[in-house]
Image (cartoon, rainbow, N blue to C red):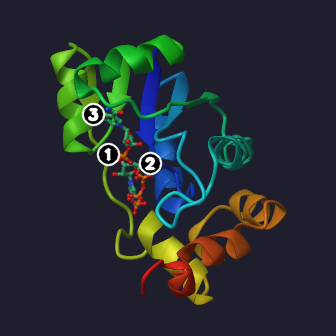
Amino acid sequence: MTRGFYIGRFQPYHQGHHRVIADIAEEVDELVVGIGSADQSHSVRNPFTGGERIMMITKALADLDLVTYAVPLEDINRNAVWVSHVRSMSPNFDVAYSNNPLVVRLFEEAGIEVRGSPMFDREVLRGTEIRERMVAGDDWSDLVPDAVERVVSEVDGIERIRRVSDTDVEATPND
Ligand SMILES: Nc1ncnc2c1ncn2[C@@H]1O[C@H](COP(=O)(O)OP(=O)(O)OP(=O)(O)O)[C@@H](O)[C@H]1O
Ligand SMILES: NC(=O)c1ccc[n+]([C@@H]2O[C@H](COP(=O)(O)O)[C@@H](O)[C@H]2O)c1
């Protein structure tokens, strides 16, 4: 039995993540999906809460023939103990999947096997691109699984990201 671990911020969970997990499903029996920066929300870079991202991932992965656990992980300000923090919150895992150089280094120093994953359609399948489209009113829904589009709608996510991307010039003191 092999259990994998895949970490991301998933702001939002998109088709690139979905393709990666479909490939990982060929290699492992179970997968922990670590939701990084779970304590961050209501900002342009991190509009969705940890709970909203749990919904996106749980619903998007419902059709996949793979046991998955979505685990929210708060950021901590000590990289040296981050792997211990992850381990304290997650089911045990045998292999971690990431392309993030810091994450790869921290896991390798802790003696955990790390596998990279290929990038799919990276010009558009990026959280940053999707968030920019949400703010601009451009099409974004084809870039995410249908379940994610429904969660964004349920939590009124487009209105939120537009609000938090506004600069309140008039509220700046001494301007
Ligand atoms: N298009 C993609 N294809 C394959 N993997 C991807 C793709 N986009 C992101 N990933 C990977 O998914 C993991 C989680 O990434 P993350 O949630 O930060 O997404 P992102 O799209 O890079 O977001 P952002 O633009 O907000 O930084 C990372 O390991 C990243 O390399
Ligand atoms: N010290 C820490 O809290 C620490 C260290 C390494 C990664 N992380 C988190 O892991 C996630 C990595 O995801 P990405 O690969 O999508 O950047 C991010 O949410 C990042 O904040 C946190």
Please tell me which residue is depicted at 27% across the width and 41% down the height of the picture.
116
Q: Which mark is residue 115?
A: 3
Q: Which mark is residue 20?
A: 2
Can residue 27 be seen by looking at this rendering? no
Q: Please state which amino acid type lies under the numbered disc 3.
A: Arg
- The local crowd at label 1, few if under 14, some if 14 to 19, many if 20 or more residues have their Cα within 10 Å, is some
Q: Is residue 98 above or below residue 27?
A: below
- The reply to whether callout 1 and callout 2 are in contact (CB within 8 Å) is yes
Percent x, y of residue 56 = 68, 50
Q: Is mark 2 within 8 Å of ligand 1?
A: yes
- The reply to whether callout 1 and callout 3 are in contact (CB within 8 Å) is yes
- The local crowd at label 2, few if under 14, some if 14 to 19, many if 20 or more residues have their Cα within 10 Å, is some
Q: Please state which amino acid type lies under the numbered disc 2.
A: Val
**Count of marks placed on residues:** 3
Percent x, y of residue 61 = 67, 43
Percent x, y of residue 60 = 69, 49
